[in-house]
């Protein structure tokens, strides 16, 4: 893994899960001060400038981070375990969404549904390819087709993050179909 990717992963950890590891303040909406983030990262042995941070934000393949309008604040677009209000609006999902996981979780998922675990939401992908990438972090991909349109019509709320990850609080097993030939 190159230095930029390592730094980006560490920034994700700080902004989504553990701001305290660099004594960073994050507000209730998930924002932190850009100057403070840079200063605190450097204090904790991570060499970073405003230019490097900008490059990480601009080139992130999943567009994980956003600046506010005047560039004084930054936050992660999704994936938090800390309790933040991203101001996401409810949205009607496509008829199907996808969730990438691995075999060892399947029996529990079919029994208990998809649970958000440590995070604020269950994450679902718009396309199978993205779900495969998500699953590959854990092993051989198993792709679940989520009957999101039906869920929505049944009154379950959906949200979409700024970087196009579909989110909801849980997915009951009855809306989950394991795809036949997982890639
Ligand atoms: C599984 C990454 C047993 C679930 C990705 C998953 C994504 C259950 C794991 C984002 C379960 C949770 C989120 C149940 C769910 N029983 N296992 N009832 N319900 N699971 O990391 O969706 O690169 O919290 O299938 O790309 O894998 O970090 O969620 O395997 O967008 O930006 O429990 O994180 O984004 O794992 O990934 P996670 P996820 P970043």
Image (tube, rainbow, N blue to C red):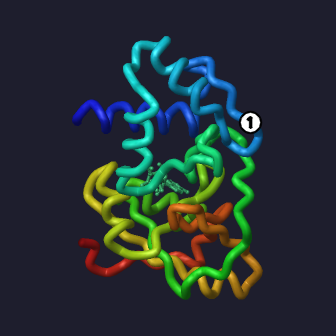
Task: State the image coordinates of residue 13 (x, y, percent, origin top left).
Answer: 50, 34
Task: State the image coordinates of residue 152 (x, y, percent, origin top left).
Answer: 68, 82
Whether residue 45 is visible = yes
Q: Which residue is mark 1?
A: 27
Q: Secondary structure at mark 1?
A: loop
Q: Residue at x 73, y 72 (%)?
A: 90
Q: From this viewpoint, which residue is outermost toward the front?
A: 70
Q: Residue at x 38, y 66 (%)?
A: 131
Task: State the image coordinates of residue 124 (x, y, percent, origin top left).
Answer: 51, 66
Q: Residue at x 64, y 46 (%)?
A: 70
* Rendered position, 81 above or below 176: above
Of the pair 26 and 130, the residue shown nearer to us: 26
* Rendered position, 50 above or below 22: below
Of the pair 91 and 146, the residue shown nearer to us: 91
Label 1: how many Cα within 10 Å (few below 14, some 14–19, many 20+): few
Of the pair 38 and 82, the residue shown nearer to us: 38
Of the pair 101 and 50, the residue shown nearer to us: 50
């Amino acid at each position: 893994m190159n230095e930029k990717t390592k730094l980006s992963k560490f920034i994700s950890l700080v902004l989504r899960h553990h701001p305290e590891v660099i004594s960073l303040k994050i507000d209730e909406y998930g924002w932190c001060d850009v100057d403070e983030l840079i200063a605190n990262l450097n204090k904790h042995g991570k060499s970073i400038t405003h230019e490097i941070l900008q490059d990480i934000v601009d080139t992130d393949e999943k567009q994980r981070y956003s600046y506010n309008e005047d560039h004084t604040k930054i936050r992660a677009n999704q994936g938090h375990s800390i309790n933040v209000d991203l101001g996401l609006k409810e949205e009607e999902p496509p008829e199907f969404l996808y969730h990438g996981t691995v075999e060892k979780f399947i029996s529990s998922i079919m029994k208990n549904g998809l649970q958000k675990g440590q995070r604020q939401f269950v994450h679902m992908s718009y396309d199978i390819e993205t779900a495969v990438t998500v699953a590959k972090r854990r092993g051989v991909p198993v792709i679940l087709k989520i009957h999101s349109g039906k869920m929505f019509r049944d009154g379950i709320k959906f949200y979409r993050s700024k970087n196009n990850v579909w989110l909801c609080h849980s997915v009951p097993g009855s809306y989950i179909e394991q795809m036949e030939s997982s890639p």
